[in-house]
């Protein structure tokens, strides 16, 4: 897309008639839109040769240099447009404002255009090039109004599913306009005449972008009716999400043996259960099937509450109150836990109402659309969207499911308090130049100089906007007053919050790094800060782990790697740093890191999605995973073999070959897909969640903190608990419930993956015996028990193994498939 953008932007509520105007004498008008206080836009087809002088005048001017036709004659311009109109589906239009020519629109079918050679074209992909005429009089927001008119004109054609653009990478003005309209930038292309971004926009993305734009432009949000601010909090929706959430509470707390319902009877495939509460006369009844790993598959429609024998409505928060003694929730922890449950329900209602894609549509969606569409937080935790500290506006702006664009706050941190760390060969100046751009760096440096400050004495660091407003401005006031911290303003790039909530993906420049920031909200058992002390060693740890993986032939063969956290900055508060213990959340309020994006590493035909998507269900209960398998054209077992080869095999090798373990849940993995089947897995969030638990490697000084002491009998739980119980248990249920494959077929596939790995690596036979993944049973490690015991500090990070809570043993679902050559299992 080539475009010249000149005007400032404003906001208006359009009144649009998208039908062709049928009044006599105006039969050529194919689109009409009136905008209050701006005027009327119309669109007509280009007329050759009549319009050539007009178009030649526009494209010859200096402002139109991105159009690439400045030095062409009038005849050459005419010839060029006759050639442009030649391919099927190609059209050119003159747009008019109040009857006067105002813009030029080229509309082409992507499959018939050279751009189609650079990506997998969908049938409904149409591209556009837009040139706005030189303004004769300034109209605030004029170009934005033109842009809206063009998109509404194109989306008014039912054949248009997505609009594709390929703007020159240097055209910052059009990038801002594209992003404002909802275009998602995916990759950089080297075209014949320019280096360009490839970006896409669907109707849904455009609609959502307009809604966000209207929210941001509202000058008095407090005047809006409360009901309009929370439309998702309706009785019907609230009943739906409470039922779904109570189903999860019952399932997970029964799995962890915190709740022990009494079986009443069997009803075909289902067993009927009754659960007594701590409140006399209050009980719950439901039907369930017990699957492998003692997973409770509960029929949501069967859940009933009885009070003195009479039916009562379902209420998750009330349920926690009714069983608080049974589940061991102390009076001191009860208020915070209830707040986390209520917030989780609020988030669930928001997701339910704002669902943009069903499972079928989501399987075809783009990377960040999938990220923001996830219906589930951590699959095991009952209170998994606590976010204590966020208010109503914060949720709409910063929660992943809101899908809002965020511009990060930037501050200058004095080197007396701040420290920078990076992987070998990456300097601070190189990082900020790449992540901010030369113009923004220069502007920030000028901001410091105007205050009489030396830019060389400061480090630029990104800050979560919520963190600045709620924590840094008031609590770091002394640092700000002393100009050790200087507010610089917001960066130009727009980011999107990820499922991990304090990490952001760069929408404006997808090849740039993720940014992870400190965020002092309480969420799922931790205050989500970042330690400046950990930041000092995080890049070195990532560099060491990455080198280990790259040097390992088996891991290279599987395509497994990590997204390195390549740089970090931590800031030490003058008062908190000396007065408070090392684990205090107040010492983790100001730090940030940069993590590699997966986008630059993608090959043609590949796309990425969070592995959490494999557990996603839409509001009708349809799951994404079976749709992916069906779309791939592979048999379920073949799809699973590919997936396990990408995900489980590398984890086995890291554990057995190197004593290296990760936290490999869905949010921490990105899957690379080709034709809807996994081909590689990318691990992220490495610095805080990687550990060496076996062997005594000679670690560099900055890497030594990842070597932890774990009792021998707990080491294999890095696979049994973190992979089998906390992820595969849910995958197996989804596949079984959707008739994709049976439980036995799934666990047999897992067993075959493990046995294939063992056969391929006989050199680790002794370790296979020590850490036997075919053992008959393993300890049930309980995550909700941890949160119920201490919902403000889930684990002692200095000794996490000592904090674990157990509840007996689980039968190992792959034990029945133990290879004959392994012999009988020992204990």
Image: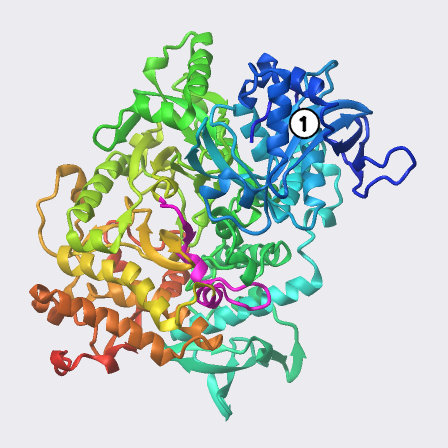
Identity of the residue drawn at 36% across and 67% down: 639
Q: Nearer the viewer, residue 56 or 167?
A: 56
Query: What is the image's colouring?
Result: rainbow
Identity of the residue drawn at 62% across and 40% down: 209
Q: Quadrant of the N terminus?
A: top right
The span picked out in magenta is 602-630
The answer to whether residue 96 of the structure is visible from this angle is yes
Q: Is residue 257 above or below residue 266?
A: above
The answer to whether residue 471 of the structure is visible from this angle is no
Q: Secondary structure at mark 1?
A: strand
Q: Nearer the viewer, residue 443 or 56?
A: 56
Residue 416 point in image, percent of width and height: 30, 20
Q: Is residue 82 above or below residue 232?
A: above
Q: Is residue 373 above or below residue 274?
A: above
606 part of magenta stretch: yes
26 part of magenta stretch: no
Residue 242 point in image, percent of width and height: 59, 66
Residue 287 point in image, percent of width and height: 52, 83
Task: Answer with left or right where residue 83 lies relative to residue 557.
Answer: right
Read off the residue under disc 1: 104
Task: Answer with left or right where residue 445 lies relative to residue 549.
Answer: right
């Amino acid at each position: 897309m080539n475009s010249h953008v000149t005007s400032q932007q404003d906001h208006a509520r359009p009144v649009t008639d998208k039908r062709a105007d049928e009044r006599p004498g105006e039969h050529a008008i194919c689109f009409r839109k009136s905008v209050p206080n701006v005027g009327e836009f119309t669109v007509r087809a280009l007329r050759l040769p009549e319009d050539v002088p007009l178009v030649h005048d526009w494209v010859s001017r200096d402002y139109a240099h991105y159009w690439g036709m400045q030095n062409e004659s009038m005849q050459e311009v005419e010839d060029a447009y006759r050639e442009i109109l030649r391919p099927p589906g190609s059209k050119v239009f003159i747009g008019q404002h109040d009857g006067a020519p105002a813009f030029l629109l080229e509309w082409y079918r992507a499959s018939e255009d050279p751009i189609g050679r650079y990506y997998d074209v969908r049938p409904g992909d149409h591209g556009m090039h837009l040139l706005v005429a030189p303004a004769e009089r300034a109209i605030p927001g004029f170009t934005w109004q033109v842009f809206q008119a063009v998109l509404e004109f194109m989306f008014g054609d039912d054949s248009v599913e997505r609009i594709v653009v390929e703007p020159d990478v240097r055209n910052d003005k059009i990038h801002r306009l594209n992003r404002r309209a909802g275009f998602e930038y995916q990759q950089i292309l080297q075209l014949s005449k320019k280096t360009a971004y490839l970006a896409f926009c669907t109707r849904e993305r455009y609609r959502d972008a307009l809604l966000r734009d209207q929210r941001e432009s509202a000058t008095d949000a407090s005047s809006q009716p409360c009901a309009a601010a929370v439309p998702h909090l309706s009785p019907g929706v609230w009943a739906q999400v409470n039922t779904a959430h109570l189903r999860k509470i019952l399932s997970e707390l029964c799995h962890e043996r915190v709740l022990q319902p009494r079986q009443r009877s069997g009803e075909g495939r289902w067993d009927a259960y009754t659960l007594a509460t701590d409140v006399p006369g209050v009980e719950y009844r439901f039907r369930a099937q017990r699957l492998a790993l003692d997973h409770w598959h509960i029929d949501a429609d069967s859940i009933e509450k009885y009070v003195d024998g009479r039916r009562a409505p379902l209420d998750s928060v009330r349920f926690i109150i009714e069983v608080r003694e049974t589940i061991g929730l102390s009076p001191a922890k009860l208020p915070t836990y209830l707040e986390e449950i209520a917030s989780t329900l609020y988030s669930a209602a928001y997701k339910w109402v704002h669902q943009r894609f069903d499972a079928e549509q989501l399987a075809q969606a783009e990377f960040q659309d999938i990220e923001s569409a996830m219906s589930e937080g951590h699959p095991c935790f009952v209170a998994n969207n606590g976010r204590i500290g966020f208010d109503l506006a914060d949720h709409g702006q910063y929660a992943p499911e809101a899908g809002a664009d965020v511009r990060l706050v930037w501050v200058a941190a004095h080197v007396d308090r701040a420290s920078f760390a990076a992987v070998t060969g990456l300097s601070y100046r190189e990082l900020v130049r790449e992540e901010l751009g030369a113009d923004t760096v220069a502007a920030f440096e000028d901001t410091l100089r105007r205050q009489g400050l030396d830019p060389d004495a400061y480090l630029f660091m990104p800050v979560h906007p919520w963190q600045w407003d709620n924590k840094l401005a008031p609590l770091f006031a002394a640092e700000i007053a002393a100009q050790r911290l200087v507010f610089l303003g917001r960066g130009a790039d727009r980011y999107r919050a990820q499922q991990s909530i304090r990490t952001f993906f760069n929408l404006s420049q997808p090849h740039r790094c993720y940014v992870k920031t400190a965020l002092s909200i309480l969420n799922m058992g931790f205050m989500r800060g970042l330690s400046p002390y950990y930041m000092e060693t995080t890049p070195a740890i990532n560099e060491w782990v990455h080198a280990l993986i790259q040097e390992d032939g088996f891991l290279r063969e599987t395509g497994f790697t990590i997204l390195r956290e390549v740089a970090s900055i931590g800031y030490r508060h003058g008062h908190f740093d000396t007065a408070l213990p090392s684990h205090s959340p107040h010492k983790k309020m100001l730090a940030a890191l940069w993590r590699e994006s997966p986008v630059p590493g993608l090959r043609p035909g590949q796309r990425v999605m969070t592995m959490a998507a494999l557990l996603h269900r839409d509001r009708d209960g349809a799951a994404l995973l079976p749709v992916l398998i069906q779309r791939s054209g592979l048999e379920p077992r073949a799809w699973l073999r590919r997936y396990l080869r990408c995900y489980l095999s590398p984890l086995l090798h890291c554990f057995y070959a190197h004593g290296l373990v990760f936290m490999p849940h869905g949010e921490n993995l990105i899957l690379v897909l080709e034709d809807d089947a996994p081909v590689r897995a990318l691990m992220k969030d490495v610095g805080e969640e990687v550990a060496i638990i076996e062997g005594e490697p000679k670690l560099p000084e900055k890497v030594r903190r990842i070597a932890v002491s774990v009792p021998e009998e707990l080491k294999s739980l890095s696979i049994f608990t973190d992979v089998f119980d906390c992820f595969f248990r849910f995958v197996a249920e989804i596949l079984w419930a959707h008739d994709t494959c049976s439980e036995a077929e799934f666990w047999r596939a897992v067993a075959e993956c493990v046995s294939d790995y063992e056969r391929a690596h006989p050199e680790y036979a002794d370790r296979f015996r020590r850490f036997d993944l075919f053992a008959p049973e393993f300890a049930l490690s309980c995550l909700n028990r941890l949160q119920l015991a201490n919902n403000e500090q889930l684990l002692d990070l200095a000794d996490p193994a000592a904090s674990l809570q157990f509840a007996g043993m689980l039968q190992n679902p792959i034990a029945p498939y133990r290879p004959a050559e392994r012999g009988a299992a020992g204990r």
